[in-house]
Image: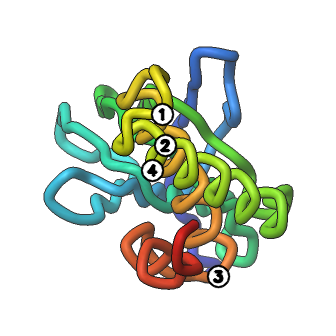
Amino acid sequence: MADERRRFEVSLVTPEGAAYEGECEMLIVPGAAGEIGILARHAPLVAMLKAGSTRVHVRETEVLEFATGPGFFKVEQDRALALVDDAVDAREIDSERARGQLEAASAELERLEAGASDADRWQIEQRIRHAENQLAVASGGSPADARVAAPPGG
């Protein structure tokens, strides 16, 4: 007898629009207190998300991974909705570009702390987190790993 896995609807949405919409067998999101795994018929849930890896198990052999920013998550009646600041398909991450973004944002933060810039600290910190998250997902680690791996002064 074939293993018929139950499926449910998923929407991964950013301010720019949907990064993914469709059915899946399982969804794993980076909850604020740890990863949250969702299967069909999951109890209703509302949670905060941190930056990390969101994995959509479309089929047993097909998993889509996204580097997602912080946001909110809701599960209700076989439907999951993740509203996140950003979502980049792991297959589309350009590590060199992300490393360059991390170095540029880190340098800007250093200038700000030295009083040589009037840039918005929160926006700089968000750019740093976004680049770290992309690097972490591209390498299979966590955003904290990208911070440790960042080159000195950048």
Task: Give the CA distance from mark 1 to mark 2.
Answer: 5 Å
Kind of residue indicated by mark 4? Glu
* Of labels 3 and 2, the one closer to you: 2
Give the mark nearer the N terminus: 1 vs 3: 1
Of helix, strand and loop, which one carries label 1? Answer: loop
Asked if the residue at tag 4 contacts the one at tag 1, i.e. Cβ–Cβ closer than 8 Å, the answer is no
Residue pointed to by mark 3 = 139
Q: Give the image quarter of residue 93.
A: bottom right
Residue closest to the eye, 85 or 62: 85
Which label's residue is closer to the chain start, 3 or 2?
2
Residue assigned mark 4: 110
User: What is the number of the mark on residue 111?
Assistant: 2
Q: CA distance from mark 4 to mark 3?
A: 26 Å
Q: Does residue 38 sit above or below 123 in this rendering?
A: below
SS for callout 2: helix
Q: Secondary structure at mark 4?
A: helix
Q: Residues within 10 Å of mark 4 (few under 14, many from 20)?
A: some
The residue under the point 48% across, 59% down is 26
| Placement of 150 over or under 126, stated as above or below | below
Q: Nearer the viewer, mark 1 or mark 3?
A: 1
* Mark 3, other Cα within 10 Å: few <14 / some 14–19 / many ≥20: few
**Residue at the spot x=57%, y=52% of the render?**
107
Disc with the residue nearer the chain's start (4 vs 3): 4
Measure the C-alpha gap from mark 1 to mark 3.
34 Å
Mark number, residue 116:
1
Label 3: which secondary element: helix
The amino acid type of the residue labelled 2 equals Arg
